[in-house]
Image: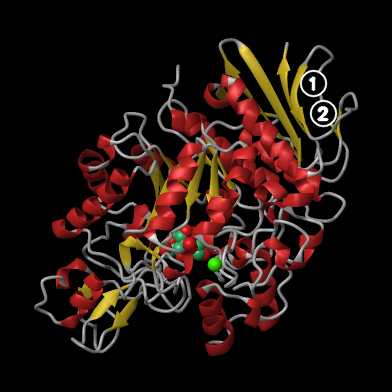
Amino acid sequence: MKEQRAWWKEAVIYQIYPRSFSDSNGDGIGDIGGITARLPYIKELGADVIWLSPVYKSPNDDNGYDISDYRDIMDDFGSMEDFDRMLDEAHRLGLKIVMDLVVNHTSDEHPWFLMSRSSLENEKRDWYIWKDGRDGRAPNNWASCFSGSAWQKDEATGQYYLHLFSKKQPDLNWENPRVRDAVCDMMTFWCEKGIDGFRMDVISMISKDQAFPDGETNGGLYGSPTPYVCNGPRVHEFLREMRTRVLSHYDLLTVGEAAGVTLEEAKKYANADGSELNMVFHFEHVDGTPGRNNPYGKWTVEHPTMPAIRAIFNKWQTGLEGKAWNSLYWDNHDQPRAVSRFGNDSEEWRVLSAKMLATCLHMMKGTPYIYQGEELGMTNAPWEDISEFRDIEVINAWKQNVVDNHFISPEYMLACFNAVSRDNARTPMQWDDSPNAGFSTGTPWIKVNPNYKAINAKAALADPDSVFYYYKKLIELRRRNPVIVYGSFEGLLPENEEIYAFQRTLDGRTLRVACNWTDRELPCGLFGGEDEELISNYKTHKAGILQPYEARAVFIS
Ligand code: TEU
Ligand code: CA
């Protein structure tokens, strides 16, 4: 099976979370000026595309994922002129820019919602999802992803509106064709500016089961909306419409964030026939462990095991082969730091295990995403008190589970936040060892990880053995070796609990990859004397052995 070539299959994407990337004016908040100044750094790394988390006008209830004007820039980040300058400069350097498209919901401060909530008769009433209550309570039992009910009663009319995220993020009603018109117009506005693609926020959730049935509670306080909002009845119809009306007119990278997506659904979203999107992000390797029946939802302190992670990746690698395209990621702004979660962030093993994880992911089939700081091996932060957190998910979960319901002990809740909270990804980018890690001359909006004196970009750029240069090499190898992009995938050593191994084959040439996920030496018979090494995180090898966290990618003869 010959894969069709495409630039977005060959590319590597670097994700920027603007608030935490680089502050150019000393107000403690990262901004567009900061990004523009740092573009040469991304160029040096070798990434081809930047995915920008939202930079639109927003009251920042959820750091920009609550948009009040899709055609303007957030005051904290700068102006539209600043944006245009950044886009020009990126293009001049040969970097593409992919925008975050957040259209499952808007901010409650968006003029559309202000009109919609004003009266039952307003022409925009039907742009959002309004329902009468049931016996003085919410229309159904659905939980919001950010704790509490997914419904908020609005005093002006006495009806409830749906918000699958915070109550300042009301869900748009995609059943209404005027809403779809407005979204398409807005997307065209950005495409005409010359942007290079869209990462579509929770795009799997835009079509709701119109019966709005109660969800299963599993003994919890609220029911799960997942089966009624993820991969809903009309989602593929809506995306095909979007393709016809907007996407097909431009040469874009499109990636859907697809909470709740299954392999079968992904084959539709990312169909190789190009009818919907280029690829989707699935969540199985980041929230499939320790398992969906955790009474505390996502909150856990457990480390996922390699065999569990491998089973998930291998299923997606072989399942989409020739039918759809994978996206590959460990880290993003919603996840804890990969080296802390999947690797080993101790002083002894941090660098080796970060390189091992990078090898494992970048040698798989799909388009790799790197999240700011991942290329430095940045780690989770030590959180000592609830007051240090900024994420609405953490703040609401603490209130619901600890303060209001005594459902989770404060000690355990804090341990869970240390292990998996999103703020681990949102501490400022560590540029150098000067105050605030060189992120800002003011007071950062969120605390800086105290390990910045050792872990920072300046130190990495001065050290040829750094995690940074290892990522740079992985990206270069991808450019020179089509087998990394287009080769078929085959899992190896399926019974081995500690070595993740697989191989890729193209035009009769086979690249074999083996990664030791432990801090011990392990026997491994996958490599022989004649092999030609592509990359490894060790300079010397031991015959028949993988050293602690050793990763190797080797052409076999
Ligand atoms: O995330 C949606 C989503 O399903 C999860 O990543 C979710 O935020 C996380 O699992 C909570 O535990 C997207 C954005 O990436 C996220 O930052 C936003 O908060 C969310 O949508 C709402 O726009
Ligand atoms: Ca700033």
- Residue positioned 57% across, 67% down in the render: 25
Location of residue 153 with respect to 373 vertically, above or below: below
Location of residue 300 with respect to 464 vertically, above or below: below
| Residue topped by disc 2 | 524
The answer to whether residue 292 of the structure is visible from this angle is: no
Identify which amino acid the numbered label 1 is placed on. Answer: Phe
| Residue topped by disc 1 | 527
Q: State the image coordinates of residue 338 (x, y, percent, origin top left).
A: 67, 52
Instruction: Check whether the beta carbons of the residues at disc 1 and disc 2 lie within 8 A of each other.
Output: yes
Location of residue 556 with respect to 125 vertically, above or below: above
Of 517 and 202, the residue lying toward us? 202
In the rendered structure, the answer to whether residue 285 lies left or right of residue 265 reads: right
Of 309 and 535, the residue lying toward us? 535
Give the total number of marks visible in the rendering: 2
Of tags 1 and 2, the one toward the viewer is: 1
**Element type at marker 1?**
loop
**Element type at marker 2?**
loop
- Residue positioned 68% across, 46% down in the render: 375
Disc 1: residue Cβ within 8 A of ligand 1's nearest atom: no
Identify which amino acid the numbered label 2 is placed on. Answer: Cys
Which mark is drawn over residue 292?
A: none
Looking at the rendered image, the quarter that the C terminus falls into is top right
Of 128 and 375, the residue lying toward us? 375
Instruction: Assess disc 1: are there few (<14), some (14-19) or many (≥20) residues with their C-alpha within 10 Å of its C-alpha.
Output: many
The answer to whether residue 154 of the structure is visible from this angle is: yes
Of 184 and 526, the residue lying toward us? 184
